Amino acid sequence: MKTGIVILSWEGAMDGVTPSSRDVIGLAQLCESVGLDSAWITDHFYFDYSDLETVGVSLPEEMHGTKSGSWECWALVSAIAAVTERINIGTLVSATAFRNPSLLARSIDTIDDLSGGRLIVGLGAGDFPFEHESFGYPVDRPIARFEEAIQIISKLLKGQEVTFSGEFYQTRQAKLIPKGCRPNGPPLLVGSVYGRPRMTRLTVEYGDYWNCFLSFTQSTVEAYLEGWVKLQNACHERGRDPATIKRNVSISVNMAKSPFPIPGAAPISGSADKIADSLAAFRDEGIEHSTVVLHPLTPTGIESFARAVEKM
């Protein structure tokens, strides 16, 4: 099982310190140098902490109405692609509502080429209403918009010429020329926090990876298996072999004695051996990749986590 770090770039993410964009890039380089397999960037830029409750986080009253922000996802991914050589680089996940899908496909293919074919493209509909509204993006019917966007993106990345007339997006003889280093483009990762039925269906139809997102809830194999059963059932209903979908699990790990910074999360914690055993339990379920929200997200925290992974 490959293992990587989700490098959060919002305010206070580095154990109370707000990372600069160069800090984020440096942490990704450190992930590579200590032997981890991937670095992942989230796609948020200005949000109200109250919106975290839409993804299952229970906030204390004093955090309601608090605003925060992050550096732009794809600018960071592009920079990381240019300064690393081995690790996978992923988005967890990029909200298709923030960008025209044709332009997003062109950016994805360019960055995958820049990386030499190391990109994993996590796509989603977007979570937080506040950042959509504050930056002028529509918040209505997010899954319907996502369904149109992923159709366009997946076909363009496979090298097809795409004419599409939808309710939200249109293209006319669009094509990616020149084409990046992978003829069929980078793999697409799709998932949602609670295995919502429509997103599960779209994972089956378009996903190369399924992401089971547990980082803000219970980082347990039992919680993962509950979602995996739902995905398997959806595969059988739509005639796809579940074995053709790679599995990613997003979990949280606390390497410190201080509390995990996301309220309500139940991270994996304890000694390096205990953390290694918990990761191995996911590996033994056949999961190909794990993406970790880590505390503390600092050079020391990443180095300590990498030593735990070595014990797996």
Image (cartoon, rainbow, N blue to C red):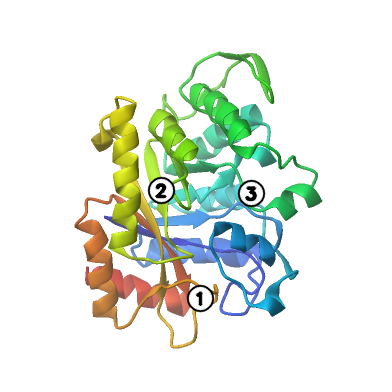
Residues 76 and 45: in front is: 45
The answer to whether residue 180 is seen in the rendering is yes
The answer to whether residue 116 is seen in the rendering is no
* Residue highlighted by disc 3: 75
Residues 282 and 108: in front is: 282
**Left or right: 257 as drawn, with respect to 42:** left
* Residue highlighted by disc 1: 298
* Residue highlighted by disc 2: 211
In the rendered structure, which amino acid carries the disc numbered 2? Answer: Asn
Q: Secondary structure at mark 1?
A: loop
- How crowded pointer 1 is (Cα within 10 Å; few <14, some 14-19, many 20+) is rated as some
Up/down of 303 relative to 136, above or below: below
**Left or right: 78 as drawn, with respect to 227:** right
Disc number for residue 224: none
Residues 21 and 71: in front is: 71
Q: Earlier in the sequence, mark 2 or mark 1?
A: 2
